[in-house]
Image (spheres, coloured by chain):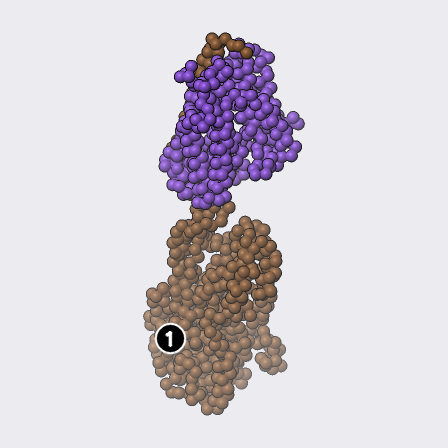
Amino acid sequence: MKRNPKDLDAAHGKMTRRALFLGGLQLAFAGGLAARMRYLQVDQADEFRLLAEENRINIRLLPPARGQIFDRNGLIIAQNSPSYRITVVPEDAGDVESVIAKLSNLVPLDPEDLERARTEMRRSPPFLPITLADQIGWEDISKVAVNAPALPGVTPEVGLTRVYPQLGDFAHVIGYVGPVSDYDLSKMEDPEPVLMIPRFQIGKVGFEAKREDVLRGKAGAKRVEVNATGRVMRELDRREGISGADMQLTIDAELQNYVQARLGRESAAAVVIDCEDGDIRAICSSPSFDPNLFVRGISVADYRMLTEDNYRPLSNKTVQGTYPPGSTFKMITALAALENGVVGPEETVWCPGHLKVAGRRFHCWKRAGHGHVDLNTSLKRSCDVYYYDVAIKTGIDRISEMANLFGLGIKHDLPMSAVAQGITPTKEWKSSSYGKDWLIGDTANASIGQGYMLASPLQLAVMSARIATGRSVTPRLLKSLDGVEQPSGAGEPLPVSENSLRMVRRGMYSVSNDRRGTAYRSRIVPKEMEMAGKTGTSQVRNITAAERAAGVIRNEDLPWERRDHALFVCFAPYDKPKFAVAVVVEHGGGGSKAAAPVARDVMLQALYNGTPPLEAYPKADRSRIKAQQERLERERVKRPLGSRSSRA
Amino acid sequence: MSYLEYHAKSTPTGLRKVLHLNWGLTLLLITVSSVGFLMLYSVAGGSFSPWVEPQVKRFALGLGVMFVVAMIPIWFWRNISVVAYLGSLALLVAVELFGTVGMGAQRWIDIGFMRLQPSEVTKIALVMLLAAYYDWLPAEKTSRPLWVLLPVALILIPTALVLKQPDLGTSILLMAAGGGVMFLAGVHWAYFVAVIAAGAGLVSAVFQSRGTDWQLLKDYQFRRIDTFLDPSQDPLGAGYHITQSKIALGSGGWSGRGFMQGTQSRLNFLPEKHTDFIFTTLAEEFGFIGGVTLLSIYMLIIVFCIASAIAAKDRFSSLVIMGIAITFFLFFAVNMSMVMGLAPVVGVPLPMVSYGGSAMLVLLGAFGIVQSAHIHRPRQASR
């Protein structure tokens, strides 16, 4: 093919021009790309750098170690123990179900836990560990570790969990912790992020809940690099959390343990308080429960057992329970009468077995009457008519005022749950609560601690301590917080004359040291340890005139829940009071029979700081006491610290 | 002037041809590929496997192919262009019948040692055929309608086959490269204006067709366009690619985070980090400076090609070199626009850098033709 060279040159020239034009276009486009690159990488670099960091860095909270709780001698009450759990990463496990099957041959797996784990597995990405079993024993964990090659994806992990080595002894004092629930979160206005950590434990009841603020500590954090699917690639840095503050209680764990054992299976409460500084040495409510059950989440069956028990093991009878104080209130009535000059110490009242007040008969517990009764005798033999008489002359308002002075009807500020205020009725109180006028008969009832009058065992112990010292001793439960000693409970002298107090103390002395005293059988023998006390038996039912005519039914013949409460308050040594004790045995019958012996044993245990010598007891009782001591020694459970019993 | 008019002795023969290779271009190609090896090493977390090793092997193979193609006189390539074109069409039909489905499209034929993507071969074969066509066609007939329609048909046949795979990116590349060769050959401006106008009309028609029975694009293609227009509307779904790509790119800053320090790519936030989105890794680790450097090397290759095309005195050589240059340019321009959020994600690799065999082999073969034209170009001195 022959072509015109001129045409070819022209065509080549045209192509060159167009090639240069296209090249120019391409260069311009490349320039545009460079400009775009500059815009993204230089102008907006900071913004994208930030987005990149957000992509890659996750902040994970590190749960702080909870503050530990000790008794006054440094014995541990609440501690953090390593808790072993078994986790599985589904992605690494491959066939998860077969791994679970193999695992359950090695260690017992709770079907409830497994069901929860399966649900979790369906929801979360396959590389996240799922907890299969929590709070596993060391032995089981070892089995899993040894068999690790046969269990792909399974890892034994260690965390911290709350353990109460004293089991039931402190259940009512310090309460327990448990995993944060949605309900807990809903109650908080602005929950701390640390609470969102799954299974993070917070105080639910008692001291653990009341001092959650200082016990919890501050969460730490670590920054981890994650990839696009959220898998942690490495840890970038970490800031350790601040552990919660350690706490020391005023309670003596040894004594607490004894008291709990002494109360046994009774539905009862006992409080031991230091007369001088108000330190609570023991505060027991019986029956108790194992708080460790609640730490992990109690099973339905266990919980039902606790709630359906007539003896209400979950209620803390020492501060939540309020009872008619019965005759233990008589010291207050006496003090009010003495202080107001209504009655002199030597003045007597005639007790024929009853007193007619506003047309109604008020009976003395002794139908035959006590005859001529002075103050000392009235306390010693617990004559009711004496108190009806002086109380009516004194008036209810003055009596209640005196009661408040001695810590009744006052809500003591203790870091425990639901501390009750009790009731010390006044005329105004009745009209505002019931819309009814105060009747003179109400005063008669109140004078012997019945009727509207209600007090908690703690209040009765405080009352005894105040009578013993004449000072407004306030109860103290927290001895030191994070090593800082807390203010003492030693109080100012009460505005009550020493004379009146001495009379009342003398009367209490007679109760347990005079042959005719209601608590003579529960006396303390050694002169330097002698105890002053007061029995109380408070009715939980009305005795009708018909019943009285037919003869009052004996307590033993009544159903348990209609029997009288037995009470006893005391302090010792009489000469130099050291401890005050209050014991309430619900529906225990008579105070002298059911409550006084317990209070005496507890008092001796506190005074001797351990098992008292048999010489402290009346001769006739020694062999019986010896048997009792041996039995209690066996029953007082000595448990190695950190042991677990909750899953047994 | 046609190559027949030159004295045979004016071109080098035998091993002397090696001395006349376009060594500058060769070096640039090696440099670009090395950048690729470096980035593949980085995205593998500092390892030669799984990507660097096969990539180096394929590059070595491709380099061999380039040299062999370069040694063969350029007129041989002109003569077999029709065969090459028909062969590539046959492959496209074959892939339709026996191809392997990957990424939602039929694209590969397994030929034992590698997977061949016929559409890659088609790009070069089309450029060769068009160059040969205009070499044959007398210049004065270039703009006559009938002689314009013929190359248009030659472009549209493979384009339609590729679009059916479906591979929108490659079909656009085919049309653009074909159109570029026609433009260089001297087809009248007016045709291009008309085609661009028609194209605009077609685009609007495509959007109109959405949701109707005669829908012209697949749903996923529409979604790609949607997310390109507004990546933020679905940041974890379809818009994820573009968003993450921009984050990686932007976080590189001026000088980057340093080799192997790119967190976005290493932590898998980047999709397709070793193939289509490899540029973001480079931009994250070497920053603006690294990105512009690579862009400059690419542009230098284009400049070398244009210079070579202008220097070549015969029409086939000039057109085939320019056509290959345009194809090469379209590769990296579309890929970079895509990762920078300027174009929808259409699945075009970064030439010589992205992991993948077909494209690299075919491109090196094409550069072999460029080299052949360079070696066998007419020389003034021998006249």
Task: Tell me which residue sits at (54%, 49%) in the image.
Answer: A125
Q: Which chain is purple?
A: B
The disc numbered 1 marks a residue on which chain? A
- Residue at which label 1 appears: A275
Q: For residue A300, what is the image quadrant?
A: bottom right
Query: Between residues A187 and B72, which one lies in front from this camera angle?
Result: B72
Query: Between residues B72 and A221, which one lies in front from this camera angle?
Result: B72
In this rendering, the answer to whether A289 lies above or below B326 is: below
Side (left or right) of A64 relative to B81: left
The colour assigned to chain A within the rendered structure: brown
Side (left or right) of A407 relative to B148: left
Q: Identify the amino acid type marked 1.
A: Cys
Task: Tell me which residue sits at (53%, 23%) in the image.
Answer: B77
In this rendering, the answer to whether B326 lies above or below A535 is: above
Task: Tell me which residue sits at (48%, 35%) in the image.
Answer: B59
Q: Position of residue A489 (x, y in %)?
A: 36, 69
Q: Position of residue A360 (x, y in %)?
A: 55, 75
